[in-house]
């Protein structure tokens, strides 16, 4: 699996975030299919030359996003596409829209602020 994971120590992005982003993209694109078993934290850390805590942090973030799921001693697997991650994003968007409305922002102002935030998050 490491032949596809490329971590750039000079990128200015934390290694766990680089790993999280690459695994997330592969899961969403289908390159890592639903049900695919991921390496153990320690094994993956050794393969990548990272600390186990770095891989564990990436796995925790991916699990919180609904991209992967841990099944106890059975291991960590790619979760069903969409699902939890999309539901969490929709909930966050709904809360943002409600908050923006309560603050008296116009629809255009709220959308412009959301666009700015998305651009910043995705590095556009």
Image (spheres, rainbow, N blue to C red):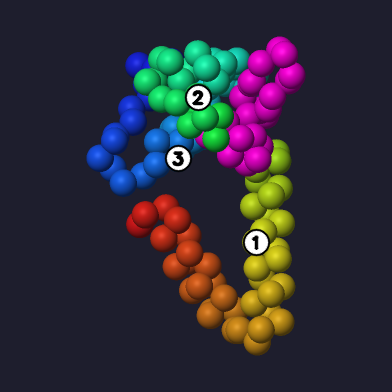
**Mark linked to residue 52:** 2
Based on the picture, tell me whether residue 76 belongs to the magenta stretch: yes
Residue 81 place in picture, x, y as percent: 63, 33
Residue 116 place in picture, x, y as percent: 44, 68
The residue pinned by badge 3 equals 17
For the N terminus, the image quarter is: top left
* SS for callout 1: helix
Q: Measured along the vertical axis of the image, is residue 109 above or below residue 34?
A: below
* SS for callout 3: helix
Q: Over which residues does the magenta segment extend?
A: 58-81
Q: Nearer the viewer, mark 2 or mark 1?
A: 2
For the C terminus, the image quarter is: bottom left
First in sequence, mark 2 or 1: give its number. 2
Apparent side of residue 4 relative to residue 57 in the rendered image (left or right): left
Occupied quadrant, residue 10: top left
The residue pinned by badge 1 equals 93
Q: Nearer the viewer, mark 3 or mark 2?
A: 2
């Amino acid at each position: 699996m490491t032949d596809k994971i490329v971590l750039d120590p000079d990128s200015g992005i934390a290694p766990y975030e680089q790993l999280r982003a690459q695994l997330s993209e592969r899961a969403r694109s289908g390159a890592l299919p639903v049900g695919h078993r991921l390496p153990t934290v320690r094994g993956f850390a050794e393969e990548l030359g990272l600390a186990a805590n770095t891989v564990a942090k990436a796995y925790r973030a991916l699990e919180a996003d609904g991209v992967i799921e841990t099944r106890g001693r059975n291991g960590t697997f790619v979760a069903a596409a969409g699902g939890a991650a999309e539901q969490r994003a929709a909930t966050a968007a709904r809360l943002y829209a409600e908050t923006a409305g309560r603050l008296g922002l116009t629809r255009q102002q709220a959308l412009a602020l959301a666009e700015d935030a998305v651009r910043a998050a995705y590095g556009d």
